Image (tube, rainbow, N blue to C red):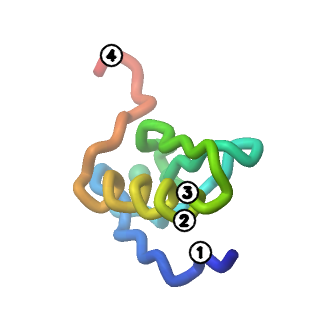
Amino acid sequence: MDLSDISLQDCPICGGAAAMFEEGGWAFTIQCCDCGAQTAIATYSKPEDRRKAAESAAYTWNLGKVTSPSPGE
Ligand SMILES: [Zn+2]
């Protein structure tokens, strides 16, 4: 299934490029290529929910709901 049409905004923390990662066939997360900020994992249990999970992760990212890996925050 092609997920390339799901648009990701730049990182809400540093403005870097975002990338979508699939976790072993059960979840998606969006992560910043520069600072490592990432969304919570969006899981799916059925193949037909895969795209929904990817869109959910992208939606979370685009809202700026990310966690920063920076220590002390
Ligand atoms: Zn970033």
Q: How many marks?
A: 4
User: Is 47 or 30 nearer to us in this picture?
Assistant: 47
Q: Crowding at label 4, few (<14), some or many (≥20) Cα neighbours within 10 Å?
A: few
Q: CA distance from mark 1 to mark 2?
A: 7 Å
Mark positioned earlier in the residue sequence (2 or 4): 2
State the SS at label 4: loop
Residue that badge 3 annotates: 49
Residue that badge 4 annotates: 72
Mark positioned earlier in the residue sequence (1 or 2): 1
Q: Can you give x and y, in whole percent of width and height, for residue 25 in the image?
A: 74, 48
At label 1, the amino acid type is Leu
User: Is 62 or 71 nearer to us in this picture?
Assistant: 62
What residue is drawn where x is 27% and y is 44%?
65
Mark positioned earlier in the residue sequence (3 or 4): 3
State the SS at label 2: helix
At label 3, the amino acid type is Asp
What residue is drawn where x is 35% and y is 55%?
61
Give the label, 2 or 4, closer to the camera: 2
What residue is drawn where x is 53% and y is 47%?
29
Residue that badge 1 annotates: 3
